[in-house]
Image (cartoon, grey):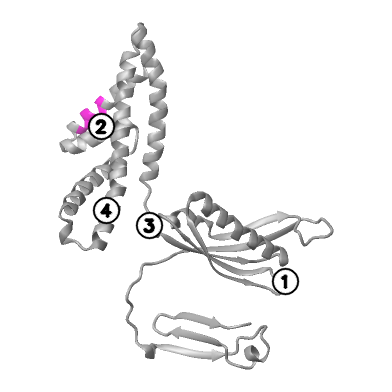
Amino acid sequence: WQARLHSKVCSTVARRARAAKVSDEEAEQIEEAARLEIDILFVKSVYESRQQKERLEKELEDAGSLSQKEVAKKAKVLSRVSELVNLYDDLLNTVGQIEEAKELAKGDDELAELANLELSDLKEQRAALLERFQVAMLPTDPMDEAKVAIIEIRPAAGGDEASLWAEDLVSMYTKFCETEGLSCKLLSKSTKDNGLVVEASLEVSGEEVYSKMKFESGTHRVQRVPATETAGRTHTSTATVAVMPELDDSEVAFNEKDIEFKFMRAGGKGGQNVNKVETACHAKHKPSGIVVVCRQER
């Protein structure tokens, strides 16, 4: 009865589409949306992606007239839309096989039993394809394609235990990169007199690495009995993680007169050289308000 109901719904939708005097392509989209049990907007988006795919393939056939950067950009877009179109075609093909299997399963012979067995596998395949298709339909972040990401880790609330937690995070991300086949390099690491971490920066390289790491940004909390605790009490400590994509090199023109420099004493450890000599620089780009601060300490 489900197969008959589904077939009736599809035919009803197609008949109403024709009665509404829509184009053949729109009627086909409406019918496919009913067969796949998805929103019509998804189907329209796939049709647009199919047209975009054909247009990009034609443009890349004449790659000689394009710069290397344009070719790489168009190739990435083509790869993404091709994946979406192929998933949709696979989903449509699987639904067609399900409809055929349902027709064969109506009998009472051995072929009907085989069709019933195949039907369960096809339904699982359809569910998996539908999930992948829905994920592929999500809008993409242009920064996801960045091949280099900078991870900055700093201890927050929790004193020395927060520094230990920050050290654990550095070790965790390093081992994660090794497991995932990503390249991880320690850019900088500042410590206190007792060796505990004040700040650490990692450079992670790999294909679309920013898309894998960007959700690590934020505050990370841990509740445990730290190594610095002698009474066995549980401490709550936090560390902050910032993940930033490395942007492509670009030329920026600015007037040096727009930059305001201020020099000051850095302060902190280092004796008279730090506290009495101007070892810190504060630069501000007045039109944009961008500020850069650099300091030196021993």
Give the CA distance from mark 2 to mark 3. Answer: 35 Å
Give the CA distance from mark 1 to mark 2. Answer: 70 Å
Q: Quadrant of the C terminus?
A: bottom right
Q: Kindly identify which residue carries mark 2.
A: 31
Front label number (4 vs 2): 4
* Sequence-first disc among 4 and 2: 2
At label 2, counting other C-alpha atoms closer than 10 Å, the crowd grade (few under 14, some 14-19, many 20 or more) is many
Q: What residue lies at 80% left-to-right and 56% top-to-bottom?
A: 233
Amino acid type, residue under disc 1 in the picture: Asn
Give the CA distance from mark 4 to mark 2. Answer: 32 Å
Q: What residue lies at 35% left-to-right and 13% top-to-bottom?
A: 105
Circle 3 — which element?
helix
Q: Kindly identify which residue carries mark 4.
A: 75
Q: What residue lies at 25% left-to-right and 55% top-to-bottom?
A: 74
Front label number (1 vs 3): 1
What's drawn in magenta, residue-wise? Answer: 11-17
Q: Kindly identify which residue carries mark 1.
A: 194
- Residue 47 position, x and y percent, is 24, 42
CB contact under 8 Å: marks 4 and 1:
no
Amino acid type, residue under disc 4 in the picture: Ala
